[in-house]
Image (cartoon, rainbow, N blue to C red):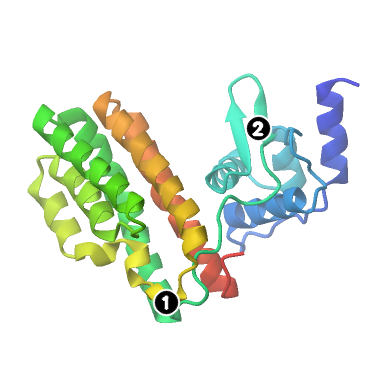
Amino acid sequence: MSSMGNIDNLSSTLQVQRLSKGDSLATTVAKQLEAEITSGRIQVGNKLPTESALCDLFGVSRTVIREAITQLKSLGLVETRRGVGTTVTRSMSSETVFAYNVDPTAIKDILHILEIRMSVESAACALAAERRTEADLAKMERHFSEFDAALARGELARKEDYEFHLAICQATHNPFFKQFYEQFNKNVIPRANLVNSNLDHVASEEYLNRVRAEHEAILSSIRAKDADAAKEAMHQHLSRAYLRYERYNESNSFD
């Protein structure tokens, strides 16, 4: 059977619900597809139906489907390659539980700040890629190395994370980006709002290694002066965090 035939068969077996306009469309689509993946109805190695097929299946636009796929990618569940399509890469989210319980007020604050950061810092990252000097780049690379050193010491690298992002804002050479970021101090880093005694340090290590990889992608794009890639890398970095804490806010669990 052809791969197109397999995709058509997969479309017919998915247990999804068409959506109403009152729903948060992209997030609802993403959660339904995630459920299909984690249940095993869509298996690792399978391709998702085409955008057109998913649009028909859910009764939504291509824009909604693309945003839903972006959310699945941020969870590490799928990857998209040009000419190949979107393939399931793992059956469980790469997000791991690293806190046993979190103050609900802290979660709401984290989400509010991340909403602002996704817009402002993504734009700042693009400008930093265009405007950065060699001195700016050296500062970012130094803070990236300091983040590594903190991880090697078994620390949560809150200060080092903050300094890396601040260096990006400074590299825009627009003082208002720097002032925007400085007003939050290191509390802008989500895990700065979590109590150490509530942390699962084994899971924290996996989480922080992924943060490191995301920082590396951001830094590589800025180094290459690729504004579009830098903007996307920053948006992916922050939106992954947002989705994680949004899930906790809805269910009181990172699972």
Q: Amino acid at mark 1?
A: Ser
Say if residue 64 shows up in the picture: yes
Residue drawn at x 50%, y 77% as measured from the top left: 101
Quadrant of the drawing holding the C terminus: bottom right
Image spot of residue 21 (x, y percent): 63, 59
Residue drawn at x 40%, y 48% as measured from the top left: 211
> Is 152 drawn above or below residue 80 in the view shown?
below
What residue did someone put label 2 on?
86
Q: Is residue 120 left or right of residue 24?
A: left
Q: Is residue 169 left or right of residue 77?
A: left
What residue did someone put label 1 on?
197
> Is 12 drawn above or below residue 3 in the view shown?
below
Which one is earlier in the sequence, the residue at label 1 or at label 2?
A: 2
Q: Which element is circle 1 on? A: helix
Quadrant of the drawing holding the N terminus: top right
Residue drawn at x 34%, y 30% as measured from the top left: 228
